[in-house]
Image (tube, grey):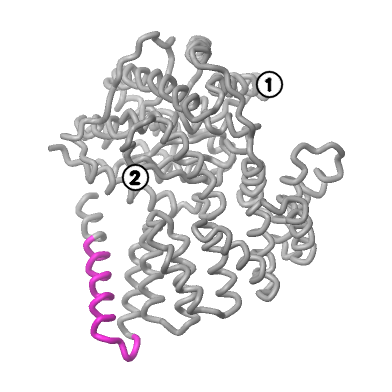
Amino acid sequence: MPDVFNLKNCYLKIISYLNHVNAMKETVIRKYKRITNLLALVSLGFMVQTSLADDLPDLGSSDRAVFSQSQEAALSKSYMQQLRASGKVIEDPIDRQYINDLGMRLVAANGQENNGHFYFFFMASPQINAFAGPDGYIAIYSGLMLATSNEEELASVMAHEIAHVLQGHIARKIADASKQKYKTLAGMLAAIALGTVSGEAAEAALLTTVAGSQQSMLNFSRQMEEEADRVGIRLLANAGYDPNSMPAFFTKLENNERYYMKVPQLLSDHPLTPNRIADAENRAAQYPARHHKTPQDYYLIKERLRVIATANPHDILNYYQQLLQKKNIKQRYAVEYGYALALQNNQEFSKALTLMKQLIKNYPEQIIFQLGAADIAADAQKPELALPIIENTYALYPDSYPVMVEYAYVLFVAKAYQKALDILREHRLDYPNDPIPYSLVARVQAKAGLLAQAYQTRAAYLVEYGNLPAALAQLQVALKLPKLTTEEKAKINAQIKNIRQQLSNGKSNQ
């Protein structure tokens, strides 16, 4: 069996490098544009250059004899650690709940009892893009969300990425890469190393390395894109969305490309041809026409992402102040919500709370406004204002993840530490992929004087971000605490052993 875990390190180093490139200024990004496109081609191969066939082959799931589900799960864990370490993953309960609910609605439209593991999340990036990683982890860039006009456009991109996962394209490409000679992988990593010195030298090295295998991977990826379009359109239709929203959004992006003379990253990773758009339109026409009314939540999440993804809080505040001077603003409630969040980020809590309370008055059934008011009051260190709001909301929506996290945060501010811990312990296991509860639990435990537990929880949080040395340091400090019980020492030592094993595995696979 090929050594998939050595491949994992290669794959993650490539991802890490791409994250580094994406963080560079636009001039540097242009310099590396061709090499990053080539790396994406070799690692995933999602490129389309020919027309779509009418009858598409079912590529099926990946070859599990080569790449098992347990191996893919292990790869995905390291993959997410790398992404979280970049600081680009948006760890926000409200956004996370929305995008996961939308994603799982599309997954359920596949009509199978077991569709596998899926997890959806936003990343802070101006790029118009989305991508599917191993084990069903699907990232939606904030730039994509802001480029869409309604939920159907967003759903069309997500359906396409979900289709790649359902058909086993991601696992298959990784498995196929593991069968290739390591000379190719070594060449890619060498090209990355050269890239720190000279973009041109890196590109030349990469072209030389992959020239022999590029065409075969390109041909295979064409079939993948064809199948992803077909399956994605079916998912849209079955989920109650207009299936034509996919080709319509393709056309919208293509027109923007012509007007602004800048290719969206989504089109670079999934190039369009007239034949591809025409084929998508023909496939969509086979389904009944539908009209999906975009919910309020879509517009609210869009503005929330705009605020979160903007680095300078003063810039986003000025944006909303200028926008609100205009008349006849569409979805004004969403713009006012974004403005309230911008005020909150600039610590203008009184104005923010007044505006949020007015939104609650106008839209009493909108839970996001309730959460916003409670959060602003808590940030202002006024738990007496926040508690009545969040307690009422929690009574109505006790199973809501964002409500649970906000309630625990307000209780933390109110110094009701034990009650906050009870709430978090009740719900934390329901969200094993999310480090947010770990962070809040650690803070509450520390304030409650449960230092040994706080260090252990903080270590678990750091592990989720791939910072194993820092996690180990937290546990070593915990071992030095006075009056540790035998059970506490055993738990801490078990965590230390596990982390050291992970560090050892990482070194052996390099």
User: How packed is label 2: few (under 14 Cα within 10 Å), some, or many (20 or more)?
Assistant: some
Q: Quadrant of residue 53?
A: top left
Residue 500 within the segment the image draws in magenta: yes
Distance of label 1 from label 2 (alpha carbons): 36 Å
Residue 83 within the segment the image draws in magenta: no
| 297 sits to left or right of 137 | right
Of marks 1 and 2, which one's residue comes earlier in the chain? 2
Q: Is residue 34 visible?
A: no
Q: Quadrant of residue 244?
A: top right
Quadrant of image for the N terminus:
top left
Give the answer, above or below, for where 103 lies relative to 382.
above
Quickly name the residue at label 1.
Answer: 259
Residue at 63% x, 39% y is 295
User: Which contiguous range is marked in magenta?
Assistant: 481-501
Residue 12's label in the rendered image is 2
The front one of 300 and 307 is 300
Furthest residue in direction left, as rendered:
1
Q: Are marks 1 and 2 in contact (CB under 8 Å)?
A: no
Q: Indicate the position of residue 331 as horizontal and vertical percent values.
A: 74, 40
User: How packed is label 1: few (under 14 Cα within 10 Å), some, or many (20 or more)?
Assistant: few
Q: Indicate the position of residue 106 as horizontal and vertical percent values.
A: 46, 34
Amino acid identity at mark 2: Leu
